[in-house]
């Protein structure tokens, strides 16, 4: 059974930092792209960042330079380091993997940025 379990969300003041983790199990995802999406209330889910199996990264313009995605294939885990958080970053953050072994989503973790 495939599972993606996010952790690390919470409440943080604007300008602060959080680090999200997503541990995947049930398959070996080293050849899959792994990434993070987010969905704010009343808005569509959007890509935040993703990394393919070769280490190529892709970021949303709104987070470029503030967020960093990384992955540890030995642990089947992807991370999202979020620095200089802004009020507009408040959302539920979802881990996602896609590729040869299929597409899967995590259950989401809430990130709330306060002023």
Image: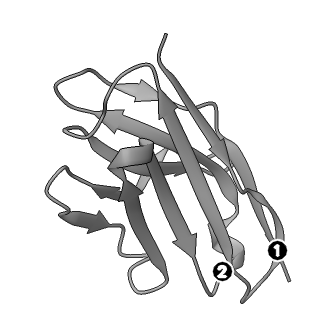
- Dot 2 or dot 1: first in sequence order is 1
Q: Is residue 47 left or right of residue 14?
A: left
Give the residue number, with chain letter if any, for mark 1. Answer: 12
Q: Position of residue 4 (x, y in %)?
A: 53, 31
Q: Nearer the viewer, residue 76 or 51?
A: 76
Residue plotted at (46% across, 47% down): 77
Q: Is residue 103 left or right of residue 16?
A: left
Give the residue number, with chain letter if any, for mark 2. Answer: 85
Label 2 SS: loop
Q: CA distance from mark 2 to mark 1?
A: 8 Å
Quarter of the image with the C terminus in it:
bottom right
Which residue, as the protein is rendered here, is positioned at the far front?
74
Q: Is residue 115 left or right of residue 4?
A: right
Tell me if residue 63 comes above or below residue 78 in the rendering.
Answer: below
> Looking at the image, do the residues carrying marks 2 and 1 touch, with CB atoms under 8 Å apart?
yes
Q: Residues within 10 Å of mark 2 (few under 14, many from 20)?
A: many
Residue plotted at (42% across, 38% down): 96
Label 1 SS: strand
Q: Quadrant of residue 8?
A: bottom right
Q: Position of residue 70 (x, y in %)?
A: 39, 64
Q: Nearer the viewer, residue 39 or 93?
A: 93
Tell me if residue 39 comes above or below residue 106 in the rendering.
Answer: below
Tell me if residue 54 comes above or below residue 89 in the rendering.
Answer: above
Residue plotted at (49% across, 10% down): 1
Q: Position of residue 38 (x, y in %)?
A: 54, 50
């Amino acid at each position: 059974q495939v599972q993606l379990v996010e952790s690390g969300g919470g409440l943080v003041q604007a300008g602060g930092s959080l680090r999200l983790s997503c541990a995947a199990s049930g398959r070996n995802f080293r050849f899959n792209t792994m990434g993070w999406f987010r969905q704010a209330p009343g808005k569509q889910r959007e890509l935040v960042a993703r990394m393919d199996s070769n280490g190529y990264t892709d970021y949303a313009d709104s987070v470029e330079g503030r967020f960093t995605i990384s992955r540890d294939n030995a642990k089947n885990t992807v991370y999202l380091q979020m620095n200089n958080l802004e009020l507009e970053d408040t959302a539920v953050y979802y881990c996602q993997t896609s590729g040869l072994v299929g597409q899967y989503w995590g259950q989401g973790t809430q990130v709330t940025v306060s002023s």
